[in-house]
Image (spheres, rainbow, N blue to C red):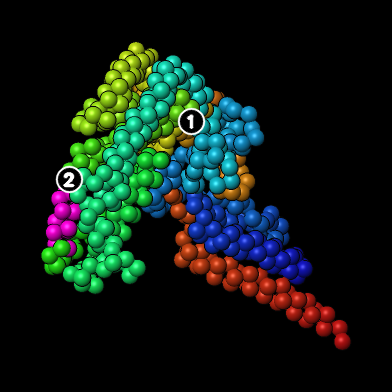
Amino acid sequence: MSLTSAMFSGVSGLLGNAEGINVIGNNLANVNTVGFKDSRVLFSDVLSANIGNGSQVGKGTQIQRVDNLFSQGTFETTTSVTDLAIQGNSFFAVMDPNATAPVNQNSAMLTRAGAFRLDSNLTLVNADGYQVLDTAGNPIKFSDNAAAISALNTALAAQAAIPAATINTLVAAQVPRATTFANAVLAAAATAYSTQATAIVGFGPPATGATAFNAAAFAAANPVAPALPTASAAEAAAAFAILTAAQTAQTAAAAAALNPTATNISAAQSAFTALNTTANTSTFTSTAMVSAFNTFKTSLTAMNTAINTNAPTGEINAALAIQTAANTAQSAATTAITTPNASTLAGVQSAFNALTTLTNNSSFSPAAFVTPYVVFQGFQNTANTAVNAAITTASPAITAATNQLAAANGLAFGKITSIDPSGLITYLGKDGVTLNYYNTSGMVGLSANAANAATVQRLAVVTVANPNGLEKVGGTLFRPTTASGISSNAFSLASNSANGSSEKILTNNLEQSTVDMAAQFVKMILTQRAYSANSKTITTADEMTQEVINLKR
């Protein structure tokens, strides 16, 4: 053996320990990687050389193998039901989204990192989009049952459209009738106000008793007319204010008579209220003014009685309320014919029943109000009977379609509620009430009951005979190799490893990295020292070689 061999032995040590520090660095880099399994370097010596007398001298070291240590990691509790961890030796099975399903066990990618989530297609995937497999070897994909729900919505709309058209016609006819009734009430009220306004101002028949007072008041307040010697300036001003309020009431009443709308009737009501307030808060002491004022007050009282009898405010408001309720019913009917379904039909029926109740519970006594009311009430009760009859006739078919739609929404995916230790997946339906089991990829589930629990597909896991035969491919994924000993059989529910006892799937948990930082730092120290020692071997052999060279001077 030569000193050169010693140098090469040192070089092999440098190379081996350099790779060792790479492994340690990779372990430490992944100390927070979910589902990561740490690695170790196994060294072996190189073939030794015989030096005689049965003695051998080694030629250095080599990396025999880099082992992955598949020990059980600790668990971190999370708030996501799709965060999964395995208590046991199995692996989650996933597939490339571009692969063709179903896949066999030895064709799936494996991982211990269970940070899964649902993508936009309702497929359970990992962070890189690899699809989680079920016990049939297919991606776990839920269904929104869109086709069935759409078809049932169409069927329900067709059933609801039949009474909706009838109801819309009936309701539409009631709106002009309600308007006609309300307008008749407003017109009668306007006439009552106009009649009284004409009399109270003094331009009507003298029999009202107001002419003398108003003429005197006007004369007392107007400098160009003969003044009343007995009236003070304050009394004259008060009398003129009453006259002005009366004239304002007459103007408002005249406007209402020309155009008897709710706004104009309200203005007339306000003007007459103001006249009453002005009159009742005025004070007169002069004999002539007191006499005239008392005569006027008698006339004003008679006017108020006539208005309350012929145009009661409460009955006017009741007529307007009926008109508003008719418009509300028409709006509901328009919605029902535009979007016919059980809910919109119920809405229009409720609105129309409310209109009928309001109509029948309203009372009208003035003759001018009663006549249009009786006509409208008769039409309304007839129409209400027809509306309810149309809905009653259509109800069985609508109810059946509604129930079918509710069932379809119950099967549609809402959210995952639980994944049990054997991989049984339970999800809440779109209706927010129904619980279902996942069963077939891309299809609606089965009702959550004991019978179905025994037969539905579950989340697949794979047991590996030789985990060290797996090939790391990044993304915390492993690819099966021949050496791993994974079966080439198809996935099946019967052969699934997760049994809920010796092999459990834990939801709301993630398996942490198995890297022990303290152990890695100790290995780092040893590797560093080994590297330094091998470098010393090289420098020492170099110095010894120099001594040989120095023998010849």
Q: Identify which amino acid the numbered label 1 is placed on.
A: Asp
* Place of residue 99 in the rendered image (x, y in percent of width and height, measured from the top left): 64, 32
User: Horizontal and vertical percent for residue 323?
Assistant: 35, 33
Q: Amino acid at mark 2?
A: Ala
Which residue of the protein is positioned furthest toward the bottom in this rendering? 553
Residue 237 versus residue 414 in the image, above or below: below
Mark 1: give few (<14), some (14-19) or many (20+) Cα within 10 Å: many
- Label 2 Cα crowd, 10 Å radius (few <14 / some 14-19 / many 20+): some
Magenta-colored span: 289-303
- Tell me if residue 487 can be seen: no
Q: Quadrant of residue 161?
A: top left
Residue assigned mark 1: 144
Depth check, front residue: 438 or 544 = 438
Q: Is residue 44 left or right of residue 519?
A: right
Q: Is residue 123 above or below residue 285?
A: above
Residue 454 placement: quadrant: top left
- In this image, 387 relative to 52: left or right? left
Which residue is pictured at 86% across the width and 83% down the height? 552
Magenta stretch, main secondary structure class: helix
Magenta segment includes 401: no
State the image coordinates of residue 489 (x, y, percent, origin top left): 55, 25
Question: Which residue corresponds to the image point at 29% horizontal and 41% vertical from the top-left?
Answer: 195
Q: Nearer the viewer, residue 470 or 217?
A: 217
Please state which of residues 482 and 375 is positioned toward the viewer in this rendering: 375
Q: Residue at x 44, y 50 (%)?
A: 511
Per the rendering, the mark at residue 448 is none
Q: Residue 291 colored magenta?
A: yes
Q: Disc number at residue 302? A: 2
What distance separates the C-alpha of mark 2 from that of mark 1?
A: 74 Å
